[in-house]
């Protein structure tokens, strides 16, 4: 009896009380934590007031100051901050460049060269001082750029005022020895002008053609130097015969340095042509304003000056081959363009051919080694 009574009492304790109406057991699928209707929200989780938060609920993973969301350590220092700011600044510049479109260096090389050829040599020299990359490009393409600028702006002047040949450019040893023959150098008569520096036989070819080219280019520099005096009507200082003042020595030295650069650098040679075009334009305008001067001159319009080219010199005009042997000739000089003459039959200017090779042949025949041995 006692065993039967204890079994009945244990059975009654183990049984659940009957559930009330409306009470249901809710258990999420795959979860072992029971949930009840009366829940609250805390940090985005459902919390039972009796059971507390579910220990198996997943929490959102966030980055802290030291550890990132993927578990890697956060790299943070002054160096990384500077690197990040630099990268952000670079990205901003690239984005701004894409929005602005193509720049000058995005153009093809031939197209950029064509654009620069519309500038004058003085403008190109100024442009070279603005950007290191542009300067490197101009120096690399100096020959092609100079040829294009001369063809576009100074085609007439380039045929009249050619640079002399450097002695190093002559490969024939016999020709170079003949050019530097002591008797030949001492007999040359190119040291007579007060306004033209003497060419160096150790640097330049001293044949008749090269000496004439040197004198013509040197004359253009000296004529350009005295344009201010000619425009203002001020007399050019007169140098007594047999004297050479210090100011004239310094002036000729500066002109010689400029000419040597023009012989070696094509862009500097184009700059000399540009300066002579300016001097010629000023001289024609100056004489045109003189109502008493009724001499024949080149027709020069405002449009011709605006173009910045020498195309107007192809028109019919006065002779341009007279060489000013003295600075006093500058007062009446308008256009000095040697090595050409006007053909009345063809109604155009005829230019002299290049006689440099012929002059070298004559020098070798006259001052060559064979002639030197015969003289001994």
Image (spheres, helix red, strand yellow):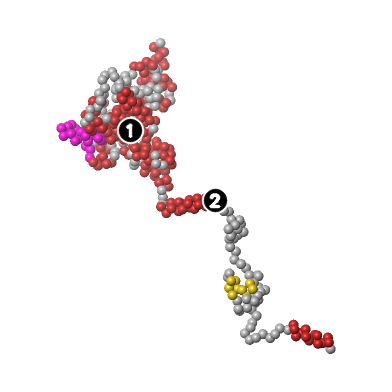
Residue bearing mark 2: 78
> What residue is drawn where x is 41% and y is 52%?
101
**Magenta stretch bounds:** 280-301
> Residue at (50%, 50%) from the top-left corner?
86
For mark 1, does the 10 Å Cα neighbourhood hold few (<14), some (14 to 19), or many (20 or more) residues? many
Residue 57 in which image quadrant = bottom right
Q: Position of residue 139 (x, y in %)?
A: 41, 37
Residue 12 x/y as whole percent: 75, 85
* Quadrant in which residue 331 is drawn: top left
In reply to whether residue 360 is colored magenta, the answer given is: no
Secondary structure of the residue carrying numbered label 2: helix
Q: Residue at x 65, y 86 (%)?
A: 20
Could you tell me which quadrant the N terminus lies in? bottom right
Label 1 close to label 2 by CB (< 8 Å): no
Residue 91 is left or right of residue 311, and the answer is right
Position of residue 267 relative to residue 87, above or below, is: above
Where is residue 254 shown, x and y percent of the image?
Answer: 34, 28
Q: Quadrant of the C terminus?
A: top left
Residue at image position (43%, 38%) is: 140
Q: Secondary structure at mark 1?
A: helix
Give the Cα separation between the discs numbered 1 and 2: 57 Å
Select label 1 or label 2 by which is in front: 2
Percent position (x, y) of residue 131? Answer: 41, 42
Give the residue at mark 1.
272
Asked if one can make out residue 265 in the rendered structure from this viewpoint, the answer is yes
Compare marks 1 and 2 and give the one earlier in the sequence: 2
Q: In this picture, is 236 found above or below 109? A: above
Q: Which mark is residue 344?
A: none
Residue nearer the viewer, 126 or 42:
42
**Residue that sits furthest to the top in the current view:** 376
Q: Residues within 10 Å of mark 2 (few under 14, many from 20)?
A: few
């Amino acid at each position: 009896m006692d065993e039967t009574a204890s079994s009945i009492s244990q059975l009654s304790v183990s049984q659940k009380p009957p559930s009330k109406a409306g009470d249901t057991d809710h258990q999420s699928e795959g979860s072992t934590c029971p949930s009840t209707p009366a829940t609250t929200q805390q940090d985005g989780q459902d919390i039972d007031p009796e059971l507390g938060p579910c220990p198996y609920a997943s929490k959102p993973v966030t980055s802290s100051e030291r550890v990132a969301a993927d578990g890697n350590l956060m790299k943070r220092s002054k160096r990384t901050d500077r690197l990040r700011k630099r990268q952000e600044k670079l990205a901003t510049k690239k984005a701004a460049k894409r929005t602005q479109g193509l720049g000058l260096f995005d153009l093809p090389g031939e197209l950029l060269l064509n654009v620069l050829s519309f500038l004058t040599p003085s403008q190109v020299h100024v442009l070279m001082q603005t950007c290191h990359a542009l300067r490197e490009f101009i120096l690399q393409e100096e020959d092609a750029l100079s040829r294009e600028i001369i063809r576009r702006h100074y085609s007439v002047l380039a045929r009249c005022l050619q640079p002399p040949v450097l002695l190093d450019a002559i490969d024939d040893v016999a020709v170079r020895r003949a050019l530097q023959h002591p008797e030949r150098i001492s007999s040359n008569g190119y040291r007579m002008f007060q306004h033209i520096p003497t060419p160096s036989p150790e640097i330049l070819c001293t044949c008749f053609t090269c000496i004439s080219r040197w004198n013509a280019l040197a004359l253009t520099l000296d004529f350009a130097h005295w344009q201010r005096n000619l425009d203002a009507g001020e007399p050019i200082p007169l140098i007594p015969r047999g004297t050479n003042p210090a100011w004239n020595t310094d002036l000729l030295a500066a002109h010689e340095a400029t000419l040597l650069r023009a012989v070696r650098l094509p862009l500097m040679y184009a700059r000399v042509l540009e300066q002579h075009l300016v001097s010629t334009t000023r001289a024609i305008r100056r004489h045109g304003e003189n109502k008493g001067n009724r001499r024949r001159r080149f027709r020069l319009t405002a449009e011709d000056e605006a173009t910045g080219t020498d195309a107007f010199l192809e028109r019919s005009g006065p002779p341009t081959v007279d060489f000013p042997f003295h600075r006093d000739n500058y007062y009446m000089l308008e256009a000095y363009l040697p090595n050409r003459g006007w053909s009345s039959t063809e109604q155009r200017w005829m230019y002299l051919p290049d006689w440099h090779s012929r002059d070298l042949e004559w020098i070798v025949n006259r001052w060559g080694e064979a002639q030197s041995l015969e003289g001994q």
